[in-house]
Amino acid sequence: MERPPLAKRLKRFLRYVLIRGVLLLLQPLPLGVARSLGARLGALAYTLAGGERRKALKSLSVAFPEKSDADRQALARDAFRHLAAAALEVACTGALDEALERLVAWPDADRQVLETALARGRGVVFVSGHVGNWELLARRVARAGYPSQSIAKETTDPRLTELVGQFRARGGVRSIWRGQEGAARAMLRALRNGEILGILIDQDTKVQSLFVPFFGQLAATPRAAADLAIRTGAAVVTGFCHREGAGYRLSMEEVPVPQDTDREAAALALTAALSSRIEAAIRRTPEQWVWMHQRWKTRPPVSEDVPLPEAAPASAG
């Protein structure tokens, strides 16, 4: 592989040093202080980061055309505040791990959903999105003793990738980097060993995808979760970690895997069902999603008549 130009390598190195330095400064902060500081920084970012702000407002206009411009602006500002506050909370690893069980409530009924799925012994494809605080979701489940691995995207800098991997590993979450050799085998092995395999499917990324509805528009949605469940017979559970006041609450639901003998049709139906659960979670707390992501960037081929698959309705709560 060809090495990137010197200027780019220097930029990546400086970025790594800056991020590592900031993390060292944040680690000793109390969670409340980090949360408050993050919210202030998020509000500042909304004001200064014009490009990201415009992306968020554009996404909100697609998802909520019925809202006024003022309402969408307020929602976008709150999303910036939430994302920054959540990021700084996660950076306070010492205080975070000490208070994790108190910070992230996990009701018995939702825990039972996961335990029932795991008890079948064929592993669990655990699907979520960038809603609330997905890092705390994985950390809370893993630190409760459930064997967990998460599929993650490598950063452009291997040093940052290692930094992220180390943070997750300290919380008991092992990462499968999807670009690395042997990643597919590692995913299948995790499920065959009866483990939880976490995957986020709410972004338009350069992976194999299916077009399914998302806020009334077809969106390219990663198909790996559906394909893995159909191939292995693993259970499928969706879960989210929504902010509630000064803490968070986990919610979980098992999603039936279609028994269609046509695997392509089954994958499309299951991906649509999972996308509908993510949309429902976002609608519950819309300020807790990453609206600056260009979710509808990839469009279906014009020459292809892409059907709108019917998703099973998401349960309330």
Image (cartoon, rainbow, N blue to C red):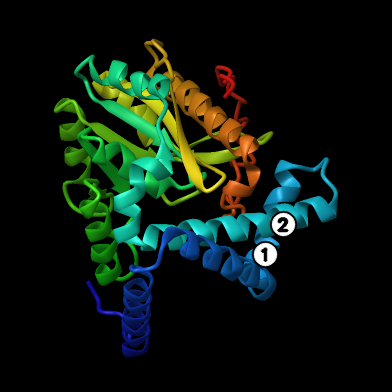
Circle 1 Cα neighbour tier, 10 Å, few/some/many (<14 / 14–19 / ≥20): many
Vertical side of 216 occupied by 3: above or below: below
* Residue sitting nearer the eye, 113 or 294: 113
x and y percent of residue 22 in the render? 38, 76
Kind of residue at disc 1:
Arg
Quadrant of the rendered structure where residue 197 is? top left
What distance separates the C-alpha of mark 2 from that of mark 1?
A: 6 Å
State left or right for residue 215 relative to residue 243.
right
Is residue 208 visible in this depiction of the protein? no
x and y percent of residue 34 in the render? 47, 64
Label 1 belongs to which residue?
53
Vertical side of 254 occupied by 246: above or below: below
Instruction: Assess whether mark 1 and mark 2 are in contact (beta carbons under 8 angstroms).
Output: yes
x and y percent of residue 26 in the render? 38, 71
* Residue found at x 29% / y 60%: 94
Label 2 belongs to which residue?
57
Mark 2 lies on a secondary structure that is: helix
Vertical side of 39 occupied by 195: above or below: above
* Residue found at x 22% / y 71%: 1
Marker count (numbered): 2
State left or right for residue 60 relative to residue 14.
right
